[in-house]
């Protein structure tokens, strides 16, 4: 399977500029962008073979990856954990309630007396 020159250009020239974006090359496999959460759980796979370099860059930036000016450029503090899309998993989910208050704890439901 030959990779398109577009994808190859992205891999060799663009990936080094993106913080937290790594290329794992699987011989003979079509290139895919595999999105992982901060716990390294797979979120989704996006096949890149039919995309142009421009489209891939756009996609990666939309996903929230931070693009540096040069591979060695420092990454701003707020982008250290980019893509930010993975971060909401860190926050405990808040169940919204009708009156806007935080829901009361239901200890009995969570810890039934055995």
Image: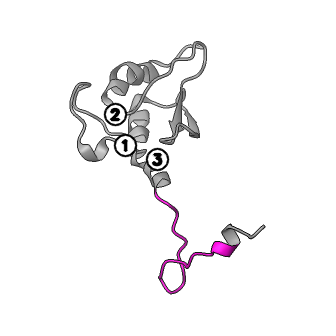
* Mark 2, secondary structure of its residue: loop
Q: Which residues are magenta?
A: 91-108
27 shown above or below 82: above
Which residue corresponds to mark 1?
82
* Mark 3, secondary structure of its residue: helix
Q: Earlier in the sequence, mark 2 or mark 3?
A: 2
Query: Most extreme residue toward the right, as rendered?
Result: 114
Query: Are discs 2 and 1 less than 8 Å apart at CB?
Result: yes
Q: Name the residue located 51 percent from the left edge and 17 percent from the top edge.
A: 25
Cα–Cα span, label 2 and label 1: 7 Å
Residue 31 forms part of the magenta stretch = no
Question: Picture coordinates of residue 103 (x, y %)?
Answer: 54, 78
Q: Name the residue located 47 percent from the left edge and 82 percent from the top edge.
A: 101
Quadrant for the N terminus, please: top right
Question: Picture coordinates of residue 110 (x, y %)?
Answer: 67, 68
Cα–Cα span, label 2 and label 3: 14 Å
97 shown above or below 74: below
In screen coordinates, is 47 left or right of 16? right
Crowdedness of circle 1 by 10 Å Cα count: few (<14), some, many (20+)? many
Which residue corresponds to mark 2?
19
Question: Picture coordinates of residue 102 (x, y %)?
Answer: 49, 77
Query: Are discs 1 and 3 less than 8 Å apart at CB?
Result: no
Q: What main secondary structure does the magenta stretch of the protein show?
A: loop
Q: Name the residue located 43 percent from the left edge and 40 percent from the top edge.
A: 59
Total of numbered circles in the picture?
3
Which residue corresponds to mark 3?
86
In screen coordinates, is 34 left or right of 65? right
Residue 95 forms part of the magenta stretch = yes
Query: Most extreme residue toward the front, as rendered?
Result: 114
Cα–Cα span, label 1 and label 3: 8 Å
Question: Picture coordinates of residue 21 (x, y %)?
Answer: 41, 31
19 shown above or below 86: above
């Amino acid at each position: 399977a030959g990779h398109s020159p577009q994808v190859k250009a992205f891999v060799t020239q663009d990936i080094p500029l993106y913080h937290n974006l790594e290329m794992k090359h699987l011989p003979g496999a079509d290139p895919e962008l595999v999105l992982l959460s901060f716990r390294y759980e797979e979120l989704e796979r996006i096949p890149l073979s039919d995309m142009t370099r421009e489209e891939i860059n756009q996609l990666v930036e939309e996903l929230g990856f931070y693009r540096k000016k040069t591979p060695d450029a420092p990454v701003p503090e707020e982008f250290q954990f980019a893509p930010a899309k993975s971060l909401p998993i860190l926050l405990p989910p808040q169940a919204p309630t009708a009156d806007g208050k935080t829901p009361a704890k239901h200890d009995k439901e969570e810890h039934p007396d055995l």
